[in-house]
Amino acid sequence: MGAVRDAICLHLQGDLGSGGLMEIVTDVYPGAPTDLAEHPLVVVVAHRAPRGSYAFQGLDHEVSQYLVKGVVKGSGTALASEINRRIRARLDGAELVVEGRTTLLASWEQDVEYPETGTGDGEDGTTYHHEGSIYEVWTEPE
C-alpha cells in the first residue's frame, strides 16, 4: 500500500512547470502533515486497502483507493478548488511508477470537499479547507 501512495506523491511532486501543482502548494505529504507544515499543501492517504484479484490460482492484479486532497488554511476555497483541479489533471489516467509493479490504471472516482475548524494550541478557530478526490489505482506484479 505504501509503494502506491509513495508513487502518487512522487508523481504529483514532479508537476513543476508553469501551471503545475507545485507552483501553488508547498509540498505533497504521504499521510498527515506535521503541525509545522506550511499551507497550502497536498495530502495523500489510503482510502481503501489493496484488494487482490486472482486468475488461475495466482494474483492477477490489485486495486486500491487513495484520497488525494489539497488543504488550505484560512479563506482559501478558490485556491483549494484550483489545487484539486491541478491534482486531477496530473493524476487521472497517469502512468505511475510503482516499485515491483506495473500500473494498469489510475482513475478519478469521486470528489471530496469539507471544511475543518482547528482546535489545537494557537488555532483559535482557524478554518482549513479540504478539497480533493478519491482515485482508484490498479497494479499488477511485474
Image (cartoon, rainbow, N blue to C red):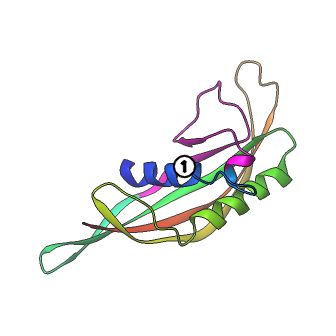
Q: Residue at x 54, y 49 (%)?
A: 44
Q: Is residue 59 above or below residue 66?
A: below
Return the x and y of residue 62 as percentages of the image width and height: 32, 67
The residue lying furthest to the top in this view is 121
The residue lying furthest to the front in this view is 17
Q: Quadrant of residue 124?
A: top right
Q: Residue at x 58, y 48 (%)?
A: 13
Return the x and y of residue 55 as percentages of the image width and height: 19, 80
In which quadrant of the rendered image does the C terminus lie? bottom left
Q: Residue at x 57, y 62 (%)?
A: 134
In the image, residue 91 lies in the stretch drawn in magenta: no
Return the x and y of residue 108 as percentages of the image width and height: 58, 70
Q: How many marks?
A: 1
Q: Quadrant of residue 127?
A: top right
Q: Amino acid at mark 1?
A: Val
Position of residue 69 in the picture relative to residue 65 (left or right): right
Front residue of this view, candidates 5 and 134: 5
Return the x and y of residue 90 as percentages of the image width and height: 61, 63
In the image, residue 31 lies in the stretch drawn in magenta: yes
Residue marked by disc 1: 44
Q: From which residue to which does the magenta span run?
A: 22-48
**Secondary structure type for disc 1:** strand
The residue lying furthest to the left in this view is 57
